Image (spheres, rainbow, N blue to C red):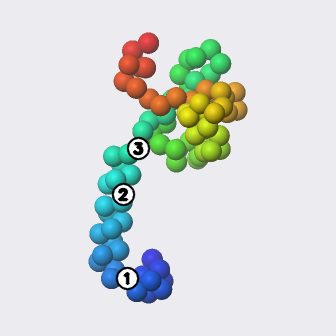
Amino acid sequence: MEHWIQKNKTDPEKYIESRKKLNKTNERNRRKIICLNNKNEIVMIYDSMRHIRLEGFKIRNVFACLNGKRKTHRDFRWKYFKESETEK
């Protein structure tokens, strides 16, 4: 971090404050994602794309499924989480 601050001649306090604001924005924009098997049963509910990536899935392919450009990724269907999904 110090190298970045020196390189860009940024005040360390302003840098830290801007990172805090960015993290708050990211938390608000984060959406849960549901992974479904071929029988439309919920396999897993992920808190964020980061968790999906850590499981070994390709983020761009999951996004393509979420946006309707692909049907599946690694034989799983992907949808954004809605509260009504858990009632099924």
The amino acid sitting under disc 3 is Arg
| Mark 3 vs mark 1, CA separation in Å | 28 Å
Q: Secondary structure at mark 2?
A: helix
Residue 30 - label: 3
Apparent side of residue 43 relative to residue 7 in the rendered image (left or right): right
Q: Residues within 10 Å of mark 3 (few under 14, many from 20)?
A: few
- Residue at the spot 58% in from the left edge and 24% down from the top edge: 36
Mark 1 belongs to which amino acid?
Thr
Secondary structure under the numbered disc 3 in the rendered image: loop
- Residue 50 horizontal side relative to residue 10, left or right: right
Residue bearing mark 2: 23
Q: Report the residue at 40% width, 26% height from top.
A: 82
How far apart are the alpha carbons under marks 3 and 2?
10 Å
Upstream in the sequence, badge 3 or badge 1?
Answer: 1
Quote the CA–CA distance across marks 2 and 1: 19 Å
Which picture quadrant has residue 14?
bottom left
Residue 10 is labelled as 1
Secondary structure of the residue carrying tag 1 is loop
Number of residues whose C-alpha sits closer than 10 Å to that of mark 1, classed few (under 14), some (14–19) or many (20 or more): few
Residue 61: which disc? none
Q: Is residue 66 left or right of residue 32?
A: right
Res. 52 visible in picture:
yes
